[in-house]
């Protein structure tokens, strides 16, 4: 099977980490330019003290060449509009891999996909940017992609991103990742701290309360195995990304819009629907809204 040409939509920390893996493997990978974006000739990714500089091929799809493999790693609240901006280059044969934080309405995504096959993904890789084209890959994690049968292109993906797994039924893991982001992101933003500080006083207790409530929500969704393993899984992500600044902390620090409304409300709605009491989660959403207006 032909090696895919990847198109990256959303060139934040995760987009840059993915891009560097593909390019390093010699795979064709283009970056979709956003209006007003600084289009430098290269970007850098620093991991464990080593900095790599990676050339960038920017493109502005205009429908003349189809996009076959689109990797969407924008902010969740931007994803639909971003997909619509490349709609002319998508068709029913395109494959779209959506790798974002937060829950999007599946119908909205399908409407923007032009009949392309959709795959959902999640990653616990930790990265932050020190400038628009410089990323620190501060914590290693796992990437899960799925939705039905494993396509041929996943072999190429894994060559570029070894810590990746194919999962036929990805939905439970999307909820698990939503819960991981709910445990880590708002608390690190509110306390302007690194992920690792959540394990220590004065935040350890609050983190534990959130983890307990989030496990209860996963149980309420009947994801029993994932729910039981959640406390350990969440602590592992915190440890592996201990030196990372969560994406929400970066956003609040940079006075940018956050993804909080696509992370906490779906979980609070679920708690309401299932009659699960989640005082810590409710409080953190209130505190967040009080402290940050964006
Ligand atoms: O997804 C993340 C984020 O910051 O948004 C984690 C995995 C928590 C890494 O920081």
Image: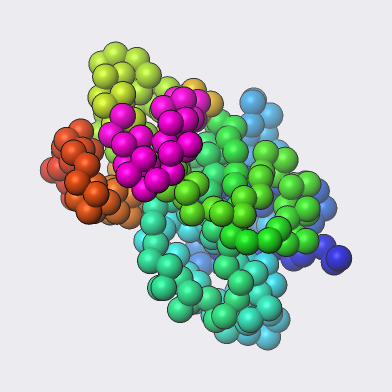
Residue drawn at point x = 19 percent, y = 50 percent:
272
**The magenta stretch spans which residues?**
212-238
Q: Residue furthest top?
A: 201
Relative horizontal placement of residue 111, taking residue 162 as reference (left or right): left
Residue 30 vertical position relative to residue 201 in the rendered view, above or below: below
Residue 211, quarter of picture: top left
How many marks on residues? 0
Q: Position of residue 220 (x, y in %)?
A: 32, 44
Residue drawn at point x = 64 percent, y = 25 percent:
49
Residue 60 vertical position relative to residue 199 in the rendered view, above or below: below
Q: Residue furthest right?
A: 1
Closer to the camera, 179 or 40?
Answer: 179
How does the figure colour the protein chain or chains? rainbow
Closer to the camera, 213 or 20?
Answer: 213
Q: Position of residue 108 (x, y in %)?
A: 40, 73
Relative horizontal placement of residue 262, taking residue 23 as reference (left or right): left
Q: Is residue 43 visible?
A: no
Residue drawn at point x = 18 percent, y = 38 percent:
277
Query: For residue 158: magenta?
Result: no
Q: Position of residue 17 (x, y in %)?
A: 62, 45
Most common secondary structure along the magenta stretch:
helix
Q: Is residue 87 visible?
A: yes
Q: Position of residue 86 (x, y in %)?
A: 55, 76
Looking at the rendered image, the quarter that the N terminus falls into is bottom right
Query: For residue 237: magenta?
Result: yes
Residue drawn at point x = 74 percent, y = 65 percent:
5
């Amino acid at each position: 099977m032909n090696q895919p040409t990847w198109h990256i939509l959303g060139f934040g920390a995760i987009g840059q980490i993915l891009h560097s893996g593909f390019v390093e493997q010699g795979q064709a990978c283009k970056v979709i330019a956003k209006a007003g974006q600084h289009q430098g000739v290269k970007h850098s990714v620093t991991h464990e003290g080593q900095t790599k500089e990676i050339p960038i091929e920017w493109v502005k799809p205009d429908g003349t060449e189809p996009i076959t493999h689109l990797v969407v790693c924008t902010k969740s609240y931007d994803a639909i509009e971003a997909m619509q901006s490349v709609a002319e280059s998508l068709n029913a044969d395109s494959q779209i891999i959506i790798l974002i934080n937060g829950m999007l309405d599946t119908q909205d995504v399908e409407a923007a996909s032009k009949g392309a096959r959709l795959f959902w993904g999640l990653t616990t890789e930790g990265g932050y940017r020190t400038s628009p084209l410089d990323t620190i890959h501060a914590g290693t994690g796992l990437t899960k992609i799925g939705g039905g049968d494993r396509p041929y292109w996943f072999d190429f993906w894994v060559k570029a991103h070894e810590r990746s797994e194919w999962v036929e039924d990805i939905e439970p893991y999307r909820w698990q990742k939503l819960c991981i982001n709910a445990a880590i992101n708002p608390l690190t933003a509110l306390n302007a701290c690194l992920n690792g500080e959540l394990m220590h006083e004065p935040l350890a207790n609050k983190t534990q309360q959130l983890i307990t409530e989030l496990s209860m929500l996963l149980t309420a969704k009947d994801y029993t195995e994932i729910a039981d393993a959640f406390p350990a899984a969440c602590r592992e992500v915190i440890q592996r990304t201990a030196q990372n600044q969560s994406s929400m902390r970066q956003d609040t620090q940079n006075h940018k819009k956050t993804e909080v409304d696509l992370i906490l409300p779906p979980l609070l709605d679920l708690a309401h629907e299932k009659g699960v009491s989640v005082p810590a989660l409710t409080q953190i959403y209130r505190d967040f809204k009080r402290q940050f207006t964006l």
